[in-house]
Image (tube, coloured by chain):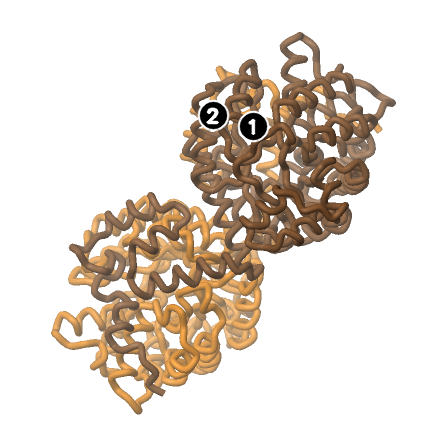
Chain colours: A brown, B orange
Amino acid sequence: MTLKQEAEKGIITSEMERAASWEGVAPVYIQQGMADGSIVIPKNKNHDLKEIRAVGKGTRTKVNANIGASPYRSDVQEELDKLAVAVHRGADSVMDLSLGADQIRIREAIMEASPVMVGTVPIYQTGFEMSAASRDVAEMTIQDFLTTIERQAEQGVDFMTIHSGVTRAALNAMEKQGRHLDVTSRGGSFIISWLRKNQGQEAPLYEYYDEILDILAAFDVTISLGDGMRPGATVDASDRAQLTELIVLGELTQRAWEKGVQVIVEGPGHVPLNKVTENMTIQKSICNNAPFYILGPLVTDIASGYDHISGAIGGALAAMNGADFLCYVTPAEHLKLPSVDDVAEGVIASKIAAHAADLALGMEYALDIERTMAQARKELDWEKQISLSVNPEKARLYREESMVGDSDVCTMCGEFCAIKRLQETGNRKTG
Amino acid sequence: MTLKQEAEKGIITSEMERAASWEGVAPVYIQQGMADGSIVIPKNKNHDLKEIRAVGKGTRTKVNANIGASPYRSDVQEELDKLAVAVHRGADSVMDLSLGADQIRIREAIMEASPVMVGTVPIYQTGFEMSAASRDVAEMTIQDFLTTIERQAEQGVDFMTIHSGVTRAALNAMEKQGRHLDVTSRGGSFIISWLRKNQGQEAPLYEYYDEILDILAAFDVTISLGDGMRPGATVDASDRAQLTELIVLGELTQRAWEKGVQVIVEGPGHVPLNKVTENMTIQKSICNNAPFYILGPLVTDIASGYDHISGAIGGALAAMNGADFLCYVTPAEHLKLPSVDDVAEGVIASKIAAHAADLALGMEYALDIERTMAQARKELDWEKQISLSVNPEKARLYREESMVGDSDVCTMCGEFCAIKRLQETGNRKTG
């Protein structure tokens, strides 16, 4: 049985207990959410996972960091460094998006080293291996794909992005409407190649969805329904192609649940701020409250070099309105494969967004931190302020640059510190 | 006559024409907005201002950068470097918040060098000069303050933050309710010192508000009504002290308009994301649509070292919901006086927020940029992508680190670039 099937029978497993304990909620809350599909615990049966996390309704907003090599930059140690810094900065999961000759070795190393759940996009491996064998991904058979996911499932991958929603109907919708920027999903582009090459046939990942689910169910791999048709520009947001795919994702969510497979639904991408909330509520509605896993979203396309900020803006508003899982965006997005430093900056920006959303939702853990920080500031307790900060090392460095002798103030205001003045003038009730 | 008084008479001045031209709107739109108070053009009669900007309803969201020395770090050239980088990164105004022995010299240098409007917080000068003369700001007379604003107005300062809303009623509201973090506004803390020292008397900046307005009107200095009672912690947001002050700011707005003085109202500060929208709509309502100038707002207090990101999240949502003018927050906030690099990062983050909001509001200039960027990405036109980015230098550096030979792709996906694949498989209508 998968965890979802156990939850449906009313069984509270040790995974549910551990996830509940980390959240500070009752185990039965997690079990009931898993039974109705609004919560998942991505954990492969073959993976001895140290940090168990629930994702979904009523749980803390989670953050994923995409790491992995590319054909042009591939180094196992660099990827392990990215993993380490992502976890150090608070990522709840990593996805290994490696593409290239070293991808299997890199994934093995990441699976071995990661304390947090690991996700992949298996079609990258299929596509690369076909390319290495001088076959184009447009010639992919369902067997090529099933072989990949079975190998990755055996390896212990906890969740997999699978683009079964990229159907001929979605492609037709895009081509009829026209887009400023077509498709920027790498997995989505593979399927579109296939559809264009194989006229008159339906996409194999949709046609043989049941076969895919059977493999995932056997290992309790959570399916992360990819949104290959997500717009790649804010000016294309919420178009017919995106919504056509979303409706299919709703159907696929239900079919996965019927086979006991846990489901996360992926979402955009590039969404102007005025469309963020509607994107969240529509997904919840169409996909029966399955957890929503979003990439950013980026609220403008001018922020190359700073897309982590564009993504933090979108992610915070999205998570306040229903998104459960934020995929980070790094400063390198649209420009290059992220470095270790880019990974750190990306995780930190997403953690700020996730925390801001949880605070807005009134989650007690977030309120506690904010109250403690206010107290530390009131007491001019710099050590406590530093330790509560999202990146204590950076906060400490700035503070050290700002020491005014052994003073309790800083170079911003010095002796004119408002907090100090309020203390001195007596913070008493004067009526 | 002030610009507002001219606007009320239906006169379209050259300043209104220049501001309208920059916005791409009709001059009459600016004139009418100035007449009803929803738009300001901060420009001192004594200031030969190169870049004229309107702030308010229907205009592009503007960004301010706070610069200035402190008693512990004071260097004219460093402040001029901050000014230069702020303007280079797109700031629409700077505020010189210098405090210390060099403050007059620094302000003169900034006024001389700045192509954009300059604001100040005159009570800093009063407070510092009193302190230098061994007097506490709690002994301030209205004459001390009027002398300062007259000198600064003669110097050509375009807008001044004046904390006339910090009244005994607001202080009582704070003391009765209690706060996690009292007051963190430097100007606000000066007035509170005064109120605590001078029991039974009303704050002089409120009591002698008419005298203040007469000086401002003579030079057409825009008043920026300071929010000295703004909460300094998210857990204190939207409390009675803040709202008590806001109601006074509404009254003060009306009184300023009656004397022909242009008005901006300042707002928080530290506001959890779920309270951002209400803060914007309440201000507009209480202050009869006077332009709203907000600091951040920071949507969490855990982001020391990254408060520019916390502020960009709050600022974007705020500007989409009515804020007109964003005061940046730098990564140094809460830790030290910002460096030149911190100023740059702060402006960039706020520009992203401002642009995201203008895009969400459907402003044509913002849509144009987004459409052009989508086209540049579709064509893999890297030069155009770089030039459209908020910081072309950083975008170029990342791109150069990512060159795959003379290829048109990058190290993220290499030959597996989705955009390239879509091009190759034929972006045609297949029906």
Do marks 2 and 1 share a subunit? Answer: yes
Question: Upstream in the sequence, badge 2 or badge 1?
Answer: 2
- Picture quarter with the N terminus of chain B: bottom left
Q: Report in which chain the residue with disc 1 lies.
A: A
Res A230 visible? yes
Q: Which of the 4 image quadrants contains residue A325?
A: top right
**Residue located at (24% from left, 56% from top):** A411
- Residue extending farthest to the left is B133
Res B359 visible? no
Image coords of residue A157 (percent x, y): 62, 28
**Residue located at (45% from left, 49% from top):** B309
> Which residue is denoted by mark 2 in the rendering?
A79
**Residue located at (48% from left, 33% from top):** A332
The dot on residue A96 is 1
**Is residue A338 toward the left or the right of residue A29 in the image?**
left
Mark 1, Cα crowd under 10 Å, few <14 / some 14-19 / many 20+, is many
Image coords of residue A142 (percent x, y): 78, 20
Image coords of residue B127 (percent x, y): 22, 72
Residue closer to the observer: B411 or B271: B271
Q: Report in which chain the residue with disc 2 lies.
A: A
**Residue located at (24% from left, 84% from top):** B197
Q: Amino acid type of disc 1?
A: Asp
The dot on residue B332 is none
Element carrying mark 1: strand
Q: Amino acid type of disc 2?
A: Glu
Name above or below for residue A140 compared with residue B254.
Answer: above
Label 2, label 1: how far apart the Cα atoms are: 9 Å
